[in-house]
């Protein structure tokens, strides 16, 4: 019995990895694994029956009844309001008109649009599909390379996973038990820097290979009519909304949860002022929010059950002891975790990786000693940003990069999968370069929160 008890943590972790590749629904797989190993733990005496009865209370009072997680549905609803009232569509069309004569201008407009969308919503699927349907035909009509077009749209559409207010950051803040406001501020500079890196790549490549991103014909006098007024309405209005959300967090006026409410009110007001907020758009936005959150929280409940049982069978000590036994040292351990997350990104979505792996890796982080490279008190925030940057690649890496499927589904016959794969490789390399820079220079992530939240 004692031998079986000692094997439970390793067997539970191994079962998780194997079942993740089985194709079974993640939430069901997590709950099933938790049930089987919970019963084994009761049988071996590692867990008493009374501990099992505490699990529902842990789920409903610790996970579901969590004020911080209220921000997630609110930010999703805010993004869907922008989509359904076509505020985002107006923004992209205006940016394309403004930048069409610049080399690579249409691609740059897509990156700017992706950055603004990212700061307004964390809904990756909706962003990629919207950018594909609105930008891809125009880019191809103007002679843009299919690979560059695909890579630009897919990478710009996934910026919302990193730039706050990101739904992923909301869940990460809760899982790591850290300040969501500080995490938002820490992610802001790396997120914007990643967008700048995309811009630099596009500008340099367009300069070196003009045939890949030719200039569009200049606007006619008729097309210029009313352009500046439309620019004010289409660009300034969303920027004011983003300023209201992020400004209230940065200024310490509101918590991220309160700021999410501010964002929803601002999105509703913008939709109303544009004359596009009606009962149908409101219903579609609410239905979309409930569907997205239902799926997220179903996995969240399964992950909570798994982490609870895993701790009860000694999983936390198993992970820490295994990590300490590795001959790599703390730097090697950090690299191993980053490589593991990167490889998992080829096969799994950020939801599975975040909700399953973060609770497993979290106990290791405070034990790391990287010398003078970073203060231990800030290690967890730096680690969270590294994971966030790493997870962004999961949307773009084949075979299961979700952004690639969204892009292909919306593009139809306009793009072949080989065009998409060819186009995303340089953008994944750009992401990995930035990840390396944040590893080498932690202040990229920590300077702004230390400045704002002294």
Image (spheres, rainbow, N blue to C red):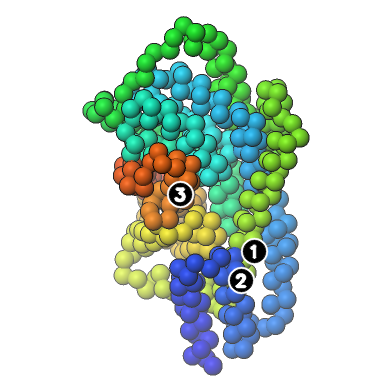
- Mark 3 and mark 1 lie on one chain; the one further toward the N terminus is 1
- Front disc: 3 or 2: 3
* Residue at figure coordinates x 76%, y 35% from the top left: 279
* Side (left or right) of 413 relative to 305: left
Q: Residue at x 38, y 27 (%)?
A: 141
Q: Earlier in the sequence, mark 2 or mark 1?
A: 2
Q: Nearer the viewer, residue 325 or 258?
A: 258
Q: Relative to residue 121, is residue 347 depicted above or below?
A: below
Per the model, the C-alpha gap separating discs 3 and 1 is: 27 Å
User: Circle 1 — which element?
Assistant: helix
Q: Residues within 10 Å of mark 3 (few under 14, many from 20)?
A: many
The residue singled out by tag 3 in the image is: 405
Q: Is 98 situated left or right of 212 in this image?
A: right
Residue 270: % across, % down: 67, 26
Q: Evaluate if marks 2 and 1 touch, with contact meaning CB atoms under 8 Å apart.
A: yes
> Quarter-wise, where is residue 177 in the image?
bottom right
Which quadrant would the C terminus be assigned to in this image? top right
Q: Identify the residue at the far bottom of this view.
A: 1
Query: Which numbered disc covers residue 31?
Result: 2
Q: Residue at x 69, y 27 (%)?
A: 276
Q: Where residue 188 sits: x, y (%)?
A: 50, 38
Say left or right for 66 vs 21.
right
- Residue 150, compared with residue 138, is above or below; it is below
Q: Disc number at residue 301?
A: 1
Q: Splitting the image into 4 quarters, where does residue 252 fall?
A: top right
Farthest residue, direction front: 413
Q: Position of residue 130 (x, y in %)?
A: 52, 36
Q: Is residue 148 above or below residue 27?
A: above
CA gap between label 2 and label 1 equals: 8 Å
């Amino acid at each position: 019995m004692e031998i079986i008890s000692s094997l439970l943590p390793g067997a539970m972790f191994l079962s998780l990895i194997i079942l993740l590749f089985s194709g079974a629904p993640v939430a069901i797989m997590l709950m099933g694994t938790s049930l089987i190993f919970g019963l084994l733990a009761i049988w071996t005496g590692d867990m008493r029956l009374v501990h099992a009865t505490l699990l529902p209370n842990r789920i409903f009072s610790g996970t579901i009844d969590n004020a911080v997680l209220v921000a997630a549905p609110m930010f999703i609803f805010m993004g869907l309001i922008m989509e359904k009232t076509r505020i985002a569509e107006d923004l992209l069309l205006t940016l394309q008109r403004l930048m069409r004569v610049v080399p690579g201008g249409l691609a740059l407009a897509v990156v700017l649009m992706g950055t603004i969308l990212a700061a307004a919503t964390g809904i990756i699927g909706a962003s990629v599909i919207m950018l594909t349907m609105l930008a891809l035909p125009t880019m191809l009509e103007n002679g843009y390379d299919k690979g560059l077009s695909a890579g630009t749209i897919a990478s710009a559409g996934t910026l919302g996973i990193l730039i706050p207010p990101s739904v992923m950051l909301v869940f990460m803040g809760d899982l790591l038990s850290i300040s969501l406001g500080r995490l938002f501020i820490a992610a802001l500079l790396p997120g914007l820097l990643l967008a700048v890196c995309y811009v630099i790549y596009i500008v340099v490549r367009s300069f070196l290979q003009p045939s890949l991103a030719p200039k569009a014909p200049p606007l006619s006098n008729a097309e210029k009519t009313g352009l500046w007024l439309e620019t004010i309405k289409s660009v300034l209005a969303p920027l004011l909304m983003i300023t209201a959300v992020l400004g209230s967090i940065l200024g310490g006026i509101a918590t991220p949860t309160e700021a999410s409410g501010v964002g929803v009110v601002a999105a509703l007001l913008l939709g109303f002022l544009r004359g596009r907020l009606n009962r149908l758009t409101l219903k579609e936005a609410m239905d979309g929010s409930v569907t997205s959150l239902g799926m997220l929280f179903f996995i969240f409940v399964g992950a909570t059950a798994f982490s609870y049982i895993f701790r009860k069978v000694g999983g936390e000590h198993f992970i820490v002891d295994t990590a300490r036994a590795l001959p790599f040292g703390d730097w090697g351990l950090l690299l191993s975790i980053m490589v593991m997350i990167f490889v998992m990104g080829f096969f799994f979505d950020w939801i599975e990786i975040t909700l399953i792996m973060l609770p497993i890796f979290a106990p290791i982080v405070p034990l790391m000693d990287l010398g003078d490279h970073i203060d231990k008190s800030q290690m967890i925030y730096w680690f969270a940003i590294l994971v966030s940057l790493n997870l962004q690649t999961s949307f773009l890496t084949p075979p299961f990069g979700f952004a690639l499927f969204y892009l292909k589904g919306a593009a139809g016959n306009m793009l072949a999968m080989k065009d998409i794969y060819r186009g995303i490789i340089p953008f994944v390399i750009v992401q990995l370069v930035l990840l390396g820079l944040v590893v080498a220079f932690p202040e990229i992530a920590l300077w702004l929160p230390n400045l704002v939240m002294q």
